[in-house]
Image: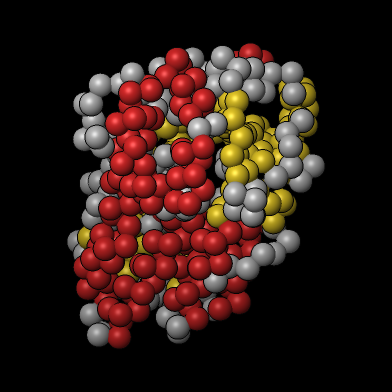
Amino acid sequence: MIYPDVLIVGAGPCGSFLAKILSEKGLEVVVVEEHPQIGHPSCCAGIVGIRGMRALGIKKEDWVLGELKSAQFFSSSGLSSKIGRGGKEAWVIDRAAFDRWLAEEALNAGAEFYLSTRCIGIDCSTSKVKLSGVFSGFAKPSIIIGSDGFSSIVRKSLGLDFGEFTFCAQIETKGEIEEGTAEIYLGQRFSPGFFAWGVRAGDVCRIGLGTTSGNPVRYLRNLIAKHPGIAGRVKQKVVVSAGVKAIPRTFLSSPARDNFLLVGDAAGQVKQITGGGIFLGMFCANIAALSILRAFEEEKPKKASKFYIQMFRKELLSELEVSKLASRFLFNLSDKKIDTLVSLLEDQMFIGIVKSAFDFDFHSSLIKALIPVFPEILGKLKVRRKSRLI
């Protein structure tokens, strides 16, 4: 039996970042990861906002493969529009290397890691955790963190789950995608309920998509073969890597209970429009760290969940709620209306609002800035005023 202050299940960016912060403050932290290698497997576009990373104290390292200045949108009929503000907005990262770097930072701070070790059972009444693998036995920590992804065993042990997911597939291959630009491929017949993306990452291109229905791998093959934005630009037979994953389409408004805290995909802490989870997960890991440290300072570890929920709701809940409404609106548009939306990106008024209000990590700022012109947008899209967003 081990008795750490904090047991973290999952050594992704959220878990390792949280472990680093807590270990630096002197807490005894154990991280367990079911896979033998940190960072593998991975299915991730690997795009993170520069300003957000810097706000978390993350500086540019060797895991940065490129930088993005603009985005180009392609409709299923062949329309396209490119938008940017001239400056660098995001890093394209080597996700596996980034994960390993964060874990090394946590190790250097004093955290203990057990790889190839699974959490196979949790007794919520006693906070006793059964582990199997390189470390087999029981742990009885003061705090248990679930940073174990969309299928989180920690979340399920609390009787919490998500009803909706976006299923994603991605390949790394050779292709012709402009460096410095993220490409977005739209169309319900290609990626129903979501969108597809393409980005250059060093010597390869990452092409992926999400869908709320059907097989994402099948949709991805069809996209590469037939979508006018990408067809003919990818060498399909040269696949460097491939992966699939699920992204929660909703989130937990109370991501903690008793001495259990959930962060990242385990709590649905992803951008509701793009599905990106690295920054928001790490943002919430930082909130969790502050909450845990406060609880230990007061010598009442179980109060960490209360502090975490309070801070999460204050800092992020509105952002997630507003973005979720916007995502439901956007991803239910027909392909014809998507054509109109892509054309709107050429409108100077629209461009001006986007350039002034867009925040790479907090999308609600742009959504709120668009509210005054929303009736005009609806008119051009020929959409009736039904949504709560309206």
Residue drawn where x is 69% and y is 64% of the image: 61
Image quarter in which the C terminus is found = top left
Q: Is residue 16 above or below residue 358?
A: below
Q: Is residue 203 above or below residue 187?
A: below
* Residue ranking furthest to the front: 348
Q: Front-most of 37 and 338? A: 338
Quarter residue 272 falls in: top left
Q: Which percent across, then down, holds residue 199? A: 66, 38
Q: Which percent across, then down, holds residue 76? A: 55, 17
Q: In the shown orientation, is residue 343 left or right of residue 27?
A: right
Residue drawn where x is 56% and y is 14% of the image: 77
Residue drawn where x is 31% and y is 73% of the image: 291
Q: In the shown orientation, is residue 157 left or right of residue 17?
A: left
Q: Is residue 240 above or below residue 152?
A: above
Image quarter in which the N terminus is found = bottom left
On the question of residue 286 being in view, the answer is yes
On the question of residue 16 being in view, the answer is no
Residue drawn where x is 46% and y is 39% of the image: 349
Quarter residue 332 falls in: top left
Q: Which percent across, then down, holds residue 388? A: 21, 35
Q: Which percent across, then down, holds residue 206? A: 67, 36
